[in-house]
Amino acid sequence: MNQPYILSFPPIGDASLGYLSVAQQLSDVPFEIARVYWTYYTPQDVTRGGHANIDKELVLVAVAGTITVTTEMQDGHKHTFVLDHPSKGLYLPKLCWHTMQYSENAVQMVIASNLYSEDDYIRDYSLFKSWQ
Ligand code: TYD
């Protein structure tokens, strides 16, 4: 689907022992996983993101805290998603402009379909809108 959508990583376990969630490539996550990175200690008044990736799909997970993500596709479709549970993820397709804001102590895990390359980023909004 060429729009962002919420994914579920069902909790395994119970309240007495705690829980575990799994993100397996090509099943829980709709692509082959090339890279995982995480962001933390982001001040609450900071907005991260503000870019799109030309050839990279992502899944964002708030493994702790709450993350509010805004997305916009080139067709103008805008959404706001709230990641507020470690069993929830957000799939971002290629060419999806996104921003993220974080609650105190939020930790964001990012699962990426490709290796990091700055050449893959569009950081200029007008360029994003006109990119073909
Ligand atoms: P960026 O992807 O813009 O972070 P966010 O979407 O959370 O705002 O990356 C922030 C900085 O980190 C940027 O200078 C690029 C650098 N970076 C790496 O060096 N390696 C990586 O694997 C990633 C994802 C980013």
Image (spheres, helix red, strand yellow):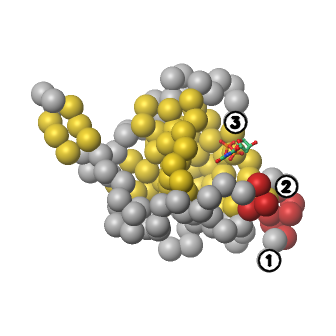
Could you say which is closer to the camera, residue 50 or residue 32? Answer: 32
- Residue 47 shows which numbered tag? 3
Name the quadrant of the C terminus: bottom right
Residue 104 picture quarter: top right
x and y percentages locating residue 99 in the rendered image: 67, 46
Name the N-terminal-most of marks 3 and 1. 3
Circle 1 residues within 10 Å: few <14, some 14–19, many ≥20 = few
Instruction: Find residue 15 and report its image quarter.
Output: top left
Residue type indicated by callout 2: Asp
Rendered-image quarter of ligand 1: top right
Give the residue number, with chain letter if any, for mark 1.
132
Query: Between residues 29 and 32, which one lies in front from this camera angle?
Result: 32
Provide the secondary structure element on which disc 3 rests: loop
- C-beta proximity under 8 Å, tags 2 and 1: no
Mark 3 → mark 2, Cα distance in angstroms: 15 Å
Q: Which residue is mark 2?
A: 124
Tag 1 or tag 2, which sits nearer the N-term?
Answer: 2
Residue visible at 74% across and 48% down?
Answer: 50
